[in-house]
Image (tube, grey):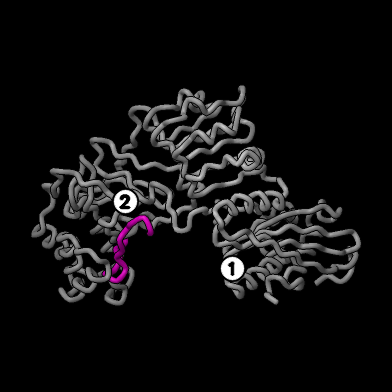
Amino acid sequence: MSPLHDFTTWEPLLRVLRDGNERAAAGHQVAGQISRGGWSVPVRRRTPKPGRASQVEDMQDEFDAVRRVQDALTDTGIHGVSFTAAIAPTGTAVLRLLGPSPAVESGVGSPHPGSLLLVEGALPEPWRRLPEAVPGVAPAPTADLELLERELRERMPGAIGATDEEIAAAEKRLGVPLPDELKVLYRVTRARWQDHAEGDAAAEREYEVVGCELFSLDDLYVADVASRPSLWRFAAKEAVVTRPDSAVQGLVGSPDWIAFGDNGGGDRLAVDLTPGPGGHVGQIIILSHEENIGAGLVADSLTDLVLRGPRQNRRRRADDGPPVVAHVNFRGVPGVEAAAHPGLEVLSIGVWEDEPLSLAPVVGLPRLRTLAAYPGTLADPLEISRLTGLEYLQLCPEDWRVLLDAEAVPRTLLAASVEPRHDADPLPVVDLANEILALWDRPPIIRTRVEGDLGPIGRGAV
């Protein structure tokens, strides 16, 4: 038997739940989620003594119990699992494990299923976008190979540079040739820690000269879409937009963005060989670790970066004209009709205090691919069947039930999400998700029942 399905694996956590959750102690079902990297468990933690912050020992029982499950996940080769637990006053416990399924993404701190992957390997539209060819773009006038090399050698005396063979090996690994300015940089310093005889001082000097923590040749990478993964529930609500005067194309990633450094806060600097209409080949851009899409311009060239330092992240959003991503809610766009235009790609309907909304104004829009609707906001969920280009649909269970019963689920979907109330019972949500998965013959979410006996409260703690 898998250790994940062994009652003894879960017994300490079930005791923690019974001791730290009034509903669990009263015999009501509770739910949670545990993954190898985190957990969400409905436990009331002890209040620390006055004047003292919470300490690890205050939650040690919970930590130890969760770690036991996490070890079982690792042994089983599973990333995470959701669960429900019902513990009778007599101590009889029924645990239901929900998952995994290769057709379901991880939930975000919730016992409910994540997005359902209806077509294997399918990517959200922004993650399918490649850079567009822009006629007439050229290197910036500031790019000067001789000046760059002279400046680097003067400011980094004694640095060990890469050989032509090492640069050629990096190009072969990456599958793209390095731009000339980047070759100059690495011929001056290959940025390996073992080359820094002065230790941190040499690395700090590199940072001061180049404006970032340099990657070694072995750590250079292509900042394409695969390097910037995102869950469907977020990615499907993004859109690639490049203004006519944008310096940087509004992409997720590009096969010609070569990441060579970090700003020290997790944001990556890259050489951009596929600039926007207002940019230059070889410009330096920054990719924020807090955003799924787009990049900001920090220098027109590597020479410019070294001579003048990084400028403030100059990122211009496409805010002219009607938005391609529309958020309809009581504080945002005032209705579906106001959001409708031929370029609309994403329609998100949030909290709405007026009458439910009709989708008629967006029927027939050629680019609409994502619809997310808060519970109770749609006047007629069956209008969704008239949206012929949907790739992603996020609805509450009640609206999904209408579509399923009418056999009106759009078959153009690549992914979908069931969004219940946060306190909804996960079991019927999983049943509903499995109904949707079955329409595409996708693997269902596995449900496993595990039973055991904790004994009456107060007896035999583990």
Q: Regarding mark 1 in the picture, which secondary structure is present there?
A: loop
Kindly report which numbered mark, 2 or 1, lies closer to the viewer in this rendering.
1
Q: Regarding mark 2 in the picture, which secondary structure is present there?
A: strand
Q: Residue at label 1?
A: 78
Amino acid type, mark 2: Ile
Left or right, residue 218 beside residue 89: left
Residue 53 showing in the rendered view: yes
Q: CA distance from mark 2 to mark 1?
A: 34 Å
Query: Where is residue 242 drawn, in percent x and y?
Result: 29, 39
Quick check: is 294 in the magenta stretch? no
Q: Residue furthest left?
A: 146
Label 1 crowding class (10 Å Cα cut-off): few <14, some 14-19, many 20+?
some
Left or right, residue 202 beside residue 99: left
Residue at 85 percent of width and 68 percent of height:
453
Q: Quadrant of residue 58?
A: bottom right
Location of the C terminus (image quadrant): bottom right
The stretch of residues the image draws in magenta is 213-226
Query: Where is residue 273 drawn, in percent x and y?
Result: 21, 53
Location of the N terminus (image quadrant): bottom right
Q: Residue at label 2?
A: 286
